[in-house]
Image: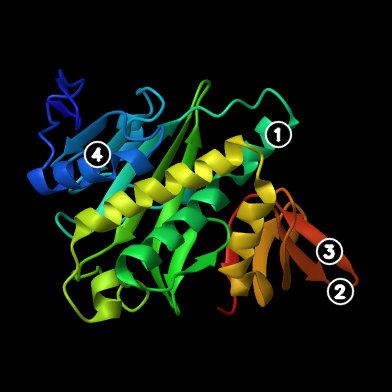
Amino acid sequence: MTSSPSDGAASPDPAAGELPPALAAAIDAARPRLGRLATRVHFFPTVGSTNDVAGVLEEGAVVVADAQTAGRGRRGHAWFSPPGSGLYVSIALAPSPSDEDGRRAMRLLTLAVGVALSEAIEAAALLRVDLKWPNDLYVGPRKLGGILAEASEHRVVIGYGINVLRTAYPDDLRGRATSIESELGRAVAREPILVETLAAVARRYDDLLAARFDAILDAWRARAAGASGRRVAWITASGAQTGTTEGIDELGALLVRIGDRVERIVSGEVEWLEW
């Protein structure tokens, strides 16, 4: 069943289940802060990818899973999504790119969500989170979470994964990943963190729709010290390049100095040689 704080409609997926009572209560209590988000909340004990489910839902719908079997990050990377330890969430949005402000909002959406998630984790858990361009959440040298934006003809799905509880990471992640609970050294509940992330995304999404772009860019820069003065490498059509980051521009592109010129990196795989 598709579960909502206000009603229970038939589910488009037979694997969907009822919202856990603690989560339903937390969403109900936060309803005034969620704005246009969480009009419906679809909960899955296990799902392939929350982004795939959210891609066919109406704007404001939220998909939450306790585990993913085919979670993914940018550029096809797998996202480790074990049961009961993290937040695996996708939100269906429909910003209109019909004018200049709308197109700029689309370009800044991932950065805006990064700001929102870092603000939410700090508010809910008192843990400072750093942002790494374009879509990662870090605490010190270890990755705490990530964001994946996928656009279709009529909507954008924003998916995010946050490591909340301690877990046994695979060999390739051990030493590179962390969780909120590991950083704090105490037990953490997932429900308040989920609710705070939804409320913060709602607030920053409203900033985008109202063209308050400077507020988002300033907040992102304040939480992304590594966006300036760090060595990075990337591949272009002419071969490998290295340079030193010089922040982001007004459209969210990463600026990198190579000798006497500055390059704009809009997309692609960037390797951070120091962090």
SS for tag 4?
loop
Amino acid beneath label 1: Asp
What residue is at 48 percent from the left and 42 percent from the top?
Answer: 149
Q: In the depicted view, which residue is nearer to us: 116 or 169?
A: 116
The answer to whether the residue labelled 2 contacts the one labelled 4, judged by CB atoms less than 8 Å apart, is no
The colouring scheme, among rainbow, by chain, secondary structure or one colour, is: rainbow
Callout 1: few (<14), some (14-19), or many (20+) C-alpha neighbours within 10 Å?
Answer: some
Residue tagged by mark 3?
A: 262
- Give the mark toward the camera: 4 or 1: 1
Amino acid beneath label 4: Gly
Give residue 218's quadrant in the image: bottom right
Q: Earlier in the sequence, mark 1 or mark 3?
A: 1
Asked whether residue 81 appears in the rendered view, the answer is no
- Taking the image as shown, residue 96 lies to the left or right of residue 143, namely right
Residue tagged by mark 1?
A: 101
Q: Earlier in the sequence, mark 3 or mark 4?
A: 4
Residue tagged by mark 4?
A: 48
- Taking the image as shown, residue 223 lies to the left or right of residue 201, namely right
What residue is at 35 percent from the left and 23 percent from the top?
Answer: 57
- Note whether 262 is above or below 104 in the view shown: below
Callout 3: few (<14), some (14-19), or many (20+) C-alpha neighbours within 10 Å?
Answer: some
What residue is at 49 percent from the left and 50 percent from the top?
Answer: 113
CA separation in Å, label 3 and label 4: 41 Å
- Note whether 184 is above or below 53 in the view shown: below
CA separation in Å, label 1 and label 2: 33 Å
The answer to whether the residue labelled 1 contacts the one labelled 3, judged by CB atoms less than 8 Å apart, is no
Residue tagged by mark 2?
A: 259
Which label number is shown at residue 3?
none
The answer to whether the residue labelled 3 contacts the one labelled 2, judged by CB atoms less than 8 Å apart, is no
Give residue 49's quadrant in the image: top left
Give residue 30's quadrant in the image: top left
Q: Earlier in the sequence, mark 2 or mark 4?
A: 4
